[in-house]
Image (cartoon, rainbow, N blue to C red):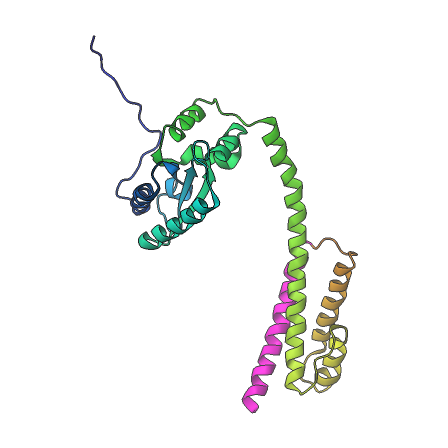
Amino acid sequence: MKFDIEKKKRPYEINITDEAFRLARIFAKKIYDELGKFIYSAVLFGSTTTEAEHKYDVDILIIIDDVHIQLTPEFLESYKIIVEKIIASIDIRIHIQTMKLGSFWEFIRAGDPVAINILRSGIALIDYGFFEPLQHLLRQGRIRPSLESIYNYYTMAPKSLENSKRHILAAFIDLYWAVIDASHAALMCLNITPPSPDHVGDMLRDHMVKKRLLKAKYVKYVNEFYYISKKISHREIAYISGKDYDEYLKKATELVNVLKKFIEKKENMV
């Protein structure tokens, strides 16, 4: 009995002439020639597969077989060296992510968003009947996130919000040290030994403001930065708004630039 067999079409189109895809194919061939069936899948993913113009890394996920093969420390070290060598021989834009087969399967089973996104847009370069069947299941709606995965990602959100607040506080401390360092440099230009941060404002007032080398408002800036930094270190201030940070950035930048001009002027006079 004869009948026509129609192969399923890919849900995405591959531009064979695309530079990123060409580089990925070259890498896949070389890594397969070196390691063979140690490589269970190699997948091109990220913006390379979703954007018309590729200006950044060529992202490739390599899934190594830890189910059938014992991955010794010696193998993993050799694998790392081989990957780096192949990248150097092709193009440094190639960026490799490596995952064990068991770990990737666990991520898919849990419906992890990162793994699902790789499945959704990834293009298999090497595959032993693992990656593309999973893509097929995803398109059929048969891979769904687990309750555990949902909970894990939900609990990450508040932590990320708290981290963002800490990042702003850390950024303010960087501004504080920019102000102190610039002030120290200006005082050193006047042959004055740099004082401790709590005395910087007084020293600027005595040696620069009174001699009309610096406006009085900048001493207020220095003292303000010192006061707030102490409040942060003593945990009396736990949050700085983005609006307030922008204002502090403006003040710190203004002061640093003013002191920079003063220092450059003094250097030219020497």
* Residue occupying the point 26% across, 43% down: 17
Image side of residue 170 versus residue 103, left or right: right
Give whichever of 127, 267 is nearer the camera: 127
Image side of residue 196 versus residue 6, left or right: right
Where residue 50 sits in the image (x, y, percent)?
39, 40
Secondary structure character of the magenta stretch overall: helix
Furthest residue toward left: 2
Quarter of the picture holding the N terminus: top left
Question: Number of numbered discs present?
Answer: 0
Q: Does the magenta segment cover residue 173?
A: no
* Residue occupying the point 65% across, 49% down: 163
Residue 247 visible (yes or no) = yes
Where residue 34 sits in the image (x, y, percent)?
33, 44
Q: Which residues are magenta?
A: 241-270
Where residue 164 sits in the image (x, y, percent)?
64, 50
Give whichever of 244, 138 is nearer the camera: 138
Image side of residue 62 versus residue 268, left or right: left
Furthest residue toward bottom: 270
In the rendered image, the vertical position of residue 9 relative to residue 82, given as above or below: above
* Residue occupying the point 64% across, 54% down: 167
Residue 189 figure quarter: bottom right
Q: Does the magenta segment cover residue 266?
A: yes
In the rendered image, the vertical position of residue 166 relative to residue 156, given as above or below: below
Quarter of the picture holding the C terminus: bottom right
* Residue occupying the point 71% across, 87% down: 211
Furthest residue toward top: 1
Residue 242 visible (yes or no) = no
In the rendered image, the vertical position of residue 194 relative to residue 170, given as above or below: below
Where residue 72 sits in the image (x, y, percent)?
47, 42
Give whichever of 268, 127 is nearer the camera: 127
